[in-house]
């Protein structure tokens, strides 16, 4: 009986410590993303290469999901997330007036980040890789051709590779009530093979601003 009580006490202590080391929460926020300079070669009059043929601009999006964090120490931890994230970009060209291409790219992303929190302050930094799984895309083309306004939408073109790997770096601040605000920069490095617009001609870049709440 004494051994049984001792085992139960040890199990209760171990469970309490595990709960103190593990945290779970929800998060959501805004994305502001674009693509790198488009690597297209185009030959103009006289055999000269045209420069500045396309310009890429930022497009707003969103992300929402869950996270869990394992606290190695009060200052250091590893946080893994599962997010539904809408990235995107806008392309314009000086050769066609009032023309633009807006592309929304929907992903399931899995960041795994090392996190360091300054003691007794709540300010933290995070760094690590992010895996992205491409789900779908939506493309909207607008322009003025021959004096007529045109508007075309298309889905399912699969212009991005099925998988990509990005680097993430960010800063955040956690309040005592479990609410956090953070900002991140995301830089795509590697993608799966395949003939897609991304990464054949460009790669994604983006910023995220998030609100998170620690449930327990």
Image (cartoon, rainbow, N blue to C red):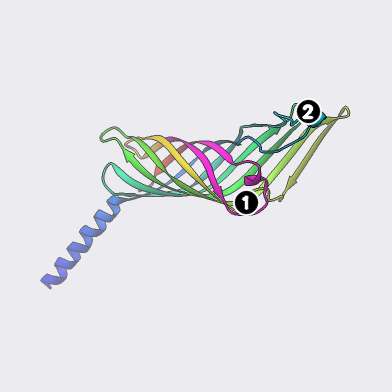
Q: Which mark is residue 65?
A: none
Looking at the picture, how far across and down is residue 183, in whole percent?
45, 34
Magenta residues span: 181-207
- Report the residue that reaches farthest toward the bottom: 1
- Mark 1, secondary structure of its residue: loop
Q: Which numbered disc flags the more N-terminal residue, 2 or 1?
A: 2
Looking at the picture, how far across and down is residue 196, in whole percent?
67, 49
Give neighbour class at mark 1: few <14, some 14-19, many 20+ (Cα, 10 Å).
many
Q: Is residue 87 above or below residue 158?
A: above
Q: Is residue 147 above or below residue 213?
A: above
Q: Residue at x 73, y 39 (%)?
A: 140
Q: Which mark is residue 161?
A: 1
Give neighbour class at mark 2: few <14, some 14-19, many 20+ (Cα, 10 Å).
few
Image label count: 2
- Mark 2, secondary structure of its residue: loop
Residue 116 colored in magenta in the image: no
Compared across the picture, whether 21 is left or right of 187 comes to left
Q: Dots 2 and 1: beta carbons under 8 Å?
A: no
The residue singled out by tag 2 in the image is: 95
Between residues 213 and 210, which one lies in front from this camera angle?
210
Q: Give the spatial CA distance, label 2 vs label 1.
A: 28 Å
Between residues 39 and 123, which one lies in front from this camera angle?
39
Compared across the picture, whether 76 is left or right of 138 comes to left
Between residues 185 and 37, which one lies in front from this camera angle?
37
- Report the residue that reaches farthest toward the right: 146
Q: Residue at x 39, y 40 (%)?
A: 126
User: Quarter of the image containing the N terminus?
Assistant: bottom left
Looking at the picture, how far across and down is residue 29, in whole percent?
51, 38
Residue 204 colored in magenta in the image: yes
Looking at the picture, how far across and down is residue 35, in whole percent?
61, 37
Q: Is residue 97 above or below residue 195?
A: above
């Amino acid at each position: 009986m004494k051994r049984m009580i001792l085992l139960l006490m040890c199990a209760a202590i171990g469970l309490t410590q595990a709960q103190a080391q593990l945290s779970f929460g929800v998060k959501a926020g805004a994305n502001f993303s674009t693509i790198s300079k488009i690597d297209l070669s185009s030959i103009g009059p006289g055999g000269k290469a045209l420069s500045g043929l396309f310009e890429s601009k930022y497009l707003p999006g969103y992300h929402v999901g869950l996270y869990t964090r394992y606290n190695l120490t009060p200052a250091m931890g590893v946080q893994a997330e599962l997010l539904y994230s809408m990235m995107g970009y806008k392309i314009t060209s000086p050769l066609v007036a009032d023309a633009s291409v807006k592309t929304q790219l929907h992903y399931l992303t899995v960041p795994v980040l090392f996190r360091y929190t300054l003691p007794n302050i709540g300010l933290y930094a995070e760094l690590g890789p992010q895996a992205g799984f491409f789900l779908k895309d939506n493309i909207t083309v607008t322009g003025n051709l021959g004096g007529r306004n045109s508007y075309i939408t298309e889905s399912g073109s699969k212009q991005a590779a099925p998988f990509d790997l990005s680097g993430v770096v960010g800063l955040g601040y956690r309040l005592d009530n479990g609410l956090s605000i953070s900002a991140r920069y995301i830089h795509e490095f590697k993608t799966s093979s395949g003939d897609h617009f991304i990464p054949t001609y460009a790669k994604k870049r983006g910023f995220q601003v998030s609100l998170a709440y620690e449930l327990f």
